Amino acid sequence: MARRNTAEALGEAATHALRRREPDLPCLEATVRRIATDNRLHPWEWLVLPDGRLLKSDAVDHHAGHDLLGCQDLAWDIAGAVVELGLDAETLRAALERDTGRPISPDLLRLYGICYLAFQMGACSMAAASCGAWPAEASRLGAAAARYAAGLRRLIG
């Protein structure tokens, strides 16, 4: 998915950076501990409570959605929080390692950052292409796809 979406949006040359990571995949797979992840960390998924605390809404079943994500390592949701909320990856990773008592691979987190951006970019691009009767929504989704593409370009160098 990451290679395909990257090639379609950024060109085949951009996928070479992803291919260079392929020999690392078996080692990274060994660090994965799949759980029922949220998979959707967009800003509109959060509520600010009257006391200022944040509450994640509808996080119960996104791992069971009809997309290709399914259950992932906690690193997937960290990557999503970094992309969507602008949080610092290392700070969040360290806090979650401390709170959960289990290590989260920095290398897996970097790969998931690329995959998260590629997935969201593809999803927004497909949605924008299907909004012919709603040009404002197509424009909003196209801008979101471009934002994800810019982030992906930065990560893959």
Image (cartoon, rainbow, N blue to C red):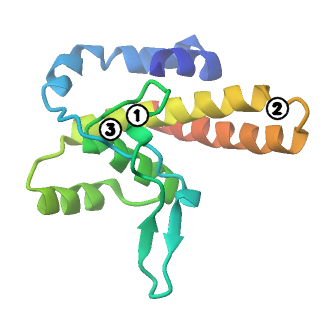
Spot occupied by residue 24 in the image (x, y as percentages of width and height)? 22, 20
Establish if 105 lies above or below 44.
above
Corner quadrant of residue 90: bottom left
For label 3, the residue is 110
Q: Which mark is residue 142?
A: none
The amino acid sitting under disc 1 is Ala
Corner quadrant of residue 89: bottom left
Q: Is residue 154 left or right of residue 147?
A: left
Task: Please tell me whether mark 3 or mark 2 is closer to you in this view.
Answer: 2
The amino acid sitting under disc 2 is Cys
Q: Is residue 50 left or right of residue 93?
A: right
Give whichever of 155, 146 is nearer the camera. Answer: 146
Q: Crowding near pointer 3: few (<14 within 10 Å), some, many (20+)?
A: some
Q: Write the residue at 40% across / 34% down.
A: 64
Mark 3 vs mark 1: which is more N-terminal?
1
For label 1, the residue is 64
Q: Is residue 13 left or right of residue 105?
A: right
For label 2, the residue is 131
